[in-house]
Image (cartoon, grey):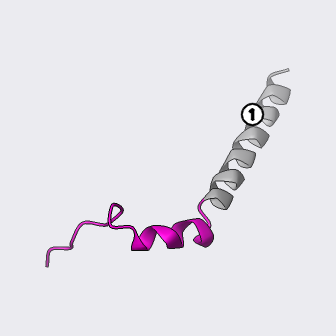
């Protein structure tokens, strides 16, 4: 029973990771680069 539950949880975790990868595709990230509200801090040398 524990092995079955573990396998189901592992599969669910893998599916969630794949969904996050699809959600953060280039098509969704590119529009953010021109948004002044979304910016990275300046690097200090």
Quarter holding the N terminus?
top right
Q: Is residue 10 above or below residue 1?
A: below
> 19 or 7, which is in the foreground?
19
Residue at x 39% of width, y 67% of height: 35
Q: Is residue 3 above or below residue 45?
A: above
Choose top left, top right, bottom left or bottom right for residue 45.
Answer: bottom left
> 3 or 44, which is in the foreground?
44
Q: Position of residue 4 (x, y in %)?
A: 85, 28
For the view shown, which residue lies furthest in the bottom direction? Answer: 45
Q: Is residue 6 above or below residue 20?
A: above
Please say whether residue 40 is one of the residues in the magenta stretch: yes
Residue at x 78% of width, y 42% of height: 11
Q: How many marks?
A: 1
Residue at x 21% of width, y 71% of height: 42
Q: Position of residue 6 (x, y in %)?
A: 76, 31
Residue ID for mark 1:
9
Q: Position of residue 16 (x, y in %)?
A: 69, 45
Give left or right: position of 33 versus 37. Answer: right
Label 1 residue SS = helix
Residue at x 59% of width, y 61% of height: 24
Please say whether residue 25 is one of the residues in the magenta stretch: yes
Range covered by the magenta-colored residues: 24-45
Q: Position of residue 36 (x, y in %)?
A: 32, 67
For the view shown, which residue lies furthest in the top direction? Answer: 1
Query: Label 1 neighbourhood size at 10 Å, few (<14), some (14-19), many (20+)?
Result: few
């Amino acid at each position: 029973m524990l092995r079955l539950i573990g396998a189901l949880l592992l599969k669910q975790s893998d599916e969630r990771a794949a969904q996050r990868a699809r959600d953060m595709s280039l098509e969704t990230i590119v529009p953010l680069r021109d948004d002044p509200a979304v910016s990275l801090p300046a690097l200090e040398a």
